[in-house]
Each structure stands twice: as C-alpha cells, then as structure tokens.
Image (spheres, grey):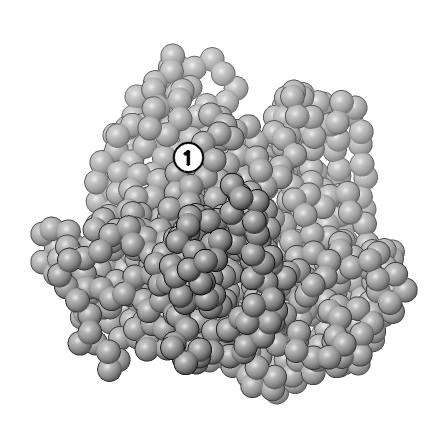
Amino acid sequence: MARPSYCVLMLCFAALLFGSLSSATDISFDGRGLKIDGERTLILSGSIHYPRSTPEMWLDLIKKAKEGGINAIETYVFWDAHEPMPRQYDFSGNLDLVRFIKTIQNEGLYAILRIGPYVCAEWNYGGLPVWLNQIPNITFRTNNEAFKHEMKNFTTFIVNMMNHENLFASQGGPIILAQIENEFGLVKQGHYGQDGKDYVQWCADLALSFDVGVPWIMCNQGDAPQPIINTCNGFYCDQSKPNNENSPKMWTENWTGWFQGWGGSRPHRDVKDVAFAVGRFFQYGGSLMNYYMYHGGTNFGHTSGGPYITTSYDYDAPLDEYGNLQQPKWGHLRNLHLILLSVQKTLLYGYKRDIDYGNMMSATVYNYEGKCVAFLGNANKLEDLTINFQDNNYTVPRWSVTVLPDCFTEAYNTAKINSQTSIMVNRPNQADDGSEPYKLLWVWRREIIEDIMKNGLVRDSVITTNKLLDHLSVTNDTSDYLWYMTRLDVNPGDPFCDKTVTLHVHTYGHVLHAFVNSRFIGTQFGINGKYDFVFEKNVKLRPGTNDISLVSVTVGLQNFGDDIKDVPIGIHGGPVQLIDYAANITKDLSTNEWIYKVGIHGIKQQLNKVHTRHQHNWRSEALPTNRPFVWYKTTFPSPLGTDPVVVDLLGLGKGEAWVNGKSIGRYWPSITAPKDGCPYKCDYNQSYDGGKCVTNCGKSTQRYYHIPREFLDDRENVLVLFEEFGGTPDDVTVQTVTVGTVCAHAYDNNNLQLSCQGGRVFTDIRFASFGNPEGTCGSFKKGTCEAPWALSYIQNNCLGRESCVIPVSEYYLGPTGCHSSEYRLAVEAVC
C-alpha cells in the first residue's frame, strides 16, 4: 500500500493560512521573517502585473495562483501608464490598481506593492514617463531636485490612494510590504557617487515619512538604510544575506524564465531548476520568496520596453501568457509550496543545524517543539549522491533538494516531477455552426506617404529646423513614428542630377524607412542589439524639386541601464548625405531645412477604430501584398467556447494590430530567431541564464498574438492591421489555445492529478504503464516490467472527465514485478 500522503494535511495548512488574512493588521519583522500579528509567516508570492492582462482575467489568475500554493501577489506600479501627462491620471480599465488590489484581498491573499516608481520590468522606458525629459535640468534617479520632486509627487499620490481605500495591512487591507526604488544598486549608485548615496537615503526617508504601517523594501540595494529591508533579485538567492541581522532574508524576484526579444529564441527555465533554487533558499533560512513572473501576460499597445521586447511577456511563468496552467511548472511548484507552508512554523522558529557531507552535499535540520524538518541539498551538477541521514540512506539526484517534513519521509524532491505536462494546441476558429474554419475576407487602404506640399509646408507638422533632432525629443513617445522630411532642388547641371547616387543615413534606430519623391526605396532595422546603423540605398534624383522623407520608428524604449535619458534614438545628428562614390562627391543634407511630423496619417483618421467617417474608403479589390505602409481590415465571429483566443499573423511583416479598436500590441512575425543555439536536450542541472535552454530557433520570434476575450463582441469583431514592412494577410487566422495532450512521468507513492482545463474531457489514453517505462512525452514505451491494471484503472477513472487523480502505487495499479526501490508511472492522454 502507499505510504501516508501529506496532500490533505498540506491543504489544511494552506486553508488556515489563507483564511487568516482578514485579521492580519500588525506587520513587523525580525531576523527570521515577516511577522503578521506577531506571528512569523512564510510568504510565497507571485508577480502578476495588472496592465499585462485585463480586469476580467484578474480573478482567474489570482485564483489559479492561490490554488498553486501562492499566498501573496506582487505587482509593480506603472508611473508612465498612470500619469501619461503631468498631473493627468489614468486608473481606468486594466490600469485600475485599486480594483486589482481588492481582487487580491477578496481571495484572501496578501499583496506586495512595488511603487518604485522606476520599475524596469521590460516595460517602456522602465515605467518612467517620457515627459520627464521636458523638465529643465532633470537627471533621472539621483540626487536631482527636479526628479525627486516628480517622484515624490507620484509616490505620494499612490500611497494616498491606497490609504484612502484602506488597502495597507495596518488598515485591514492586504498590502503587507511596499517597495521604494528598484535595483538602483545594479546600475546607478556607483555612477553617481555621493549623489547616488544621498538619493538612496532620500528614498528611504520619503518611504518612511508616509507611515503606512508596513515595512518598506529595496531590492538589490546592499546599503539600504535601516529599517528598510534589502532584498535579493536573481535566478538564485540562497547565498544572499540581508545587510542587518534584524532583517529577514527575502527574495523579491525569482526569475521563473526570461523575457524574449524580437529576433531572439524563446527562453525556458526548467521547473526542476526553479524548484531547486526555491528549495535551497528555504534550506538556508529564507522567509519570503516571490516568483517573477507568476503570470507574465501581454504587452498591449506600446508598453513593451527593451528596445525590441516582444509583445508576448509569457516569461515561461507558471501561468502562460493567456492564463493557462503551464505544466509541469505550475503543478511541480505547487507541490513544493504546500509542503513548505505545512512546516512553516518549524522553519521560521526552529533551531537550525547544518551538516556538510562534502562533494557539494549538505543537510539542514530545523527543530521546534518536538517537530523536525530536514532539507537534503545536492548542489553537485554531475553526480547523484547517497548519504546516511539519521540512520537512513537517501539518494539525492544531482542539482536537487529533498524535503523531509518529518526528518524521515521523502515528501518531495525538486528533480522528481509528479505533475502532468500539458501540450498546448491551437485550433482554428470555427464558423457559428462549428463545421469549418472561418475564412477571413479583407479590405485595405494605403497609408499616405507624407511629402512637402508646393508651398513648402507639411500637414500637421510639429517643427521645422536646420538640425537632425533626436526622435524622442520630437515625439515625446506619443507615437512610434517620426517623419524627417527635406526638399532638395537639383539643377540640370548639378553633378547629382539624373544620376544614380547613394542616399546615406546614419541613425540610432530602431527602424528606418526611406522614400524619395513618394517612392519607397528601402527599409532597415537594427539587429543583435545594435540599433546604431547606416542605411544606404541607390536613388535617382530628377531635375527640379526632390522630396526626401525618412521615417524613424521606435520598437520599445530602453528600460534598464545607466542614463536611459541620454540614449540617442532616431536620426539624431545624422549625417544624412547624398554620395556619388564613383566621382567621390558628397552632398551633406544634415543642415538642410528639415520638417518633422509625428505619427501616421491612418491613426489621425482613426482607421484603427471600429466606426469612423472613413469607413467607405476601404477597398476590396486588388488586395496588395508585400507592399509597405498598407492598412488591412477584416471581421470575424467570436470563437466558440471559453479557451483563450489568438490571431496567427504569420505572413505579415511588422506593424500593429487592433481588435474592436483596442491595440493588442506591435507585431513582427517576419523577424526570425537564429537557426543555431537550440539544444537537442537541455539538462536542468546547470546554473541558469536567459541564453540557456532556448527553443524556436529559425522560426518566427512571435507569430501568435493574444486577443483577450474581453476585447471581443458577441457578434462581429473587427481586426485592423497597419502593415509597415509589407506582407500578406492571406494566411492570417483566428485561433483558440487549449490543452491537446497530457503527459506525466510520476513516481510511486504520490498522487498524480491529470486535467484537461477549460471544460474539455479526456477522450483517449494513448499510453499508460506503471513499472519502469522509458521515453518522453510522445515517445513513451514499456520497460522490462509493468503493473497489469494501470491502463484499465486510468481509463476507468479518467475517460469522459475533465480531471482525475491517480494514486501511483501497486495497491491500485497492480504489482509491477520490478526489482527496484522506485517505480514510475508514465501516462499520455488526449483531451
């Protein structure tokens, strides 16, 4: 028979913890942990950024986090989104911070509010409003009075809002921690010297002056002034230490994966490595750990940073971009959370003893009031190690941690996954009767190519000058697009007249399009992180007046690093030249009269909106393909069911997409990841970084774009695309994302839970074997021994059901006949 399971016991502990939130009002801390009403409490938190989903998604995301053993939700506050113009605030829609925090509270979870207000977060400009650049003599994030004035104003605004809504724990709310600044120690302090140190002290003084009744933290800030708690961010924080013996060991960002850039491969972090990092952290005295991200979400509109951060911010998190459980990551971590919560009092109050076995093998024992918890940690990357602990032998796989909640029973090992793997599939949108995929019918319009009129003016131009200005200084980030336009008169005797010469443009990026006399001559963009490039194309100038229009395009503003304010963008200073290389003649146009216009004409005409006065000007005949600067529009019915919805834009170049007038973000399916660098097999037993364990080599960086169901109407929906590079919409399809296949490779004496999600049921069991099966999902095969009842037991208990629980033991599945100390169950099922 199976040994006693800890599942029921752990669920009871979790329920007790979550149910106690409403009375948690007094928040303090000591060197062992955060205290809630005087009781040290283990915090397992997950980051969910409210603007990267929709208000209608928040409850489901938070519920799934709670079910996953998470007891706190952490979020940044996004200054640029909330204050797009000075003293003009926006907390509507998915910016409704109060609603988000109250949703957390209603689910009985704690909240961690990272006000910053600089956030990094792969968010546009790190969350700083671009209008800050217009303030004279401002320098960001240092002892600069202009910056401190604005930072204090916004931070005060947020704190007052939370106070007004009684959302701090001292008022009975869910917020147990608040953060000021963000990772300043990584980039700024050394750069600014004493001004940096003074700024850190000012930040601490500002935070404490609010007297909100909860502790304040600073992450990656080794000199955080007391009583500010300095915390760790990184892939591993087990060796981190607070800067004061009275501060607890906290981990504010446990990176569950990594972000993706346009032209990059797709990062993945094996859940075995994530769990190993968590196990090590709590083995060595950790008290609070937050997953960054628990749900990554979507960079709607122009919110992605970088440059070149993709619209998807999936982050390989436990909940995928659309809110699905990303299995086995969600389930494997859930099992660890429940065990940690069940022994939290022993961990936070117990006497701690470390045992070094050598060869990077160690044990840590916690004893409290007759209870004992042990962690067996093997940091050896190459060898499984067997040790004798308290007169029992335990084999600990390489790069793993075993948890013994009673110092005897192995209840969990970070390298042994007992959760399902979900293989997601995309299904085409069906017509209303569900009989066949819905065919999209397109109409189109040209984007107006801006030129100088006969009178020398340009419609809606913003400035005329004899300089090549910085892109951001003109647009103030109100649009990705900035037109640089100049006019050149060429006389018949001019050496450049009626000859093929080279247009030479130096730009700091990110993308450049060039037109001469309204004729498109070429596009170029920065690659491999090098946004500073030279564009050269041959042109032929006609006698008389010639117009040159250069379109500079941004693809997300830099979100991290020193002096992001001073990073040049666009054709900043040039030069722009015409060059006859054969005759060695150069005409410098950099000091010509340049006329600037912000944005594209179609946006001003509201072609991206559902109902506009320009509706009748769309054309249905002669649909253009592979032509830049074209608008496409189509309609589609809402997909049946409740599965997440995406649009597959493969075949298009680059641009932006709107559904029913709401931007679902930039798209760029034509840019592909490098062909090389994706390993055939990625071992978890290595120190992780974002360049390891990538997939999707040689394929489109991102072809699928999330359409939240809340953006859809019950009947007809309007999809509008602005195609900037040129492509074809012929193969564009609306699809749903769901679980197609479920696989598992579970160990004996565990309960394996299988689920199809989304109301779908199991329709077939393709494989089931309990004993010593071999292979991986999609290629399982029987080993040398197996239990006789496994397949029939799983068929009887799973087919026709949305979920089922399989006790992995000989008692239920039959004797294996194996001569082994450990048996495994392999299952592959179809939803």
Residue 209 in which image quadrant: bottom right
CA neighbours of label 1 inside 10 A, class few (<14), some (14 to 19), many (20+): some
Residue 198 in which image quadrant: bottom right
Rendered residue at 81%/39% (across/down): 353
Residue 290, given in percent of the width and then of the height, sits at: 62, 55
**Looking at the image, which is closer to me, 391 or 708?**
708
Q: Is residue 203 visible?
A: yes
Rendered residue at 34%/18% (across/down): 782
Q: What amino acid type should be assigned to the residue bearing mark 1? A: Gly
Please give left or right for residue 761 compared with residue 452 in the image: left
Residue 23, given in percent of the width and then of the height, sits at: 62, 75
Q: Quadrant of the N terminus?
A: top left
Residue 805, given in percent of the width and then of the height, sits at: 37, 42
Rendered residue at 42%/30% (across/down): 745
Q: Is residue 753 above or below residue 826?
A: below
Please give left or right for residue 432 compared with residue 109 in the image: left
Rendered residue at 55%/72% (across/down): 593
Q: Which residue is mark 1?
A: 698
Q: Is residue 593 above or below residue 728?
A: below
Q: Quadrant of the C terminus?
A: top left
- The secondary element bearing badge 1 is classed as loop
Residue 455, given in percent of the width and then of the height, sits at: 41, 81
Q: Is residue 477 visible?
A: no
Q: Is residue 795 above or below residue 380?
A: below
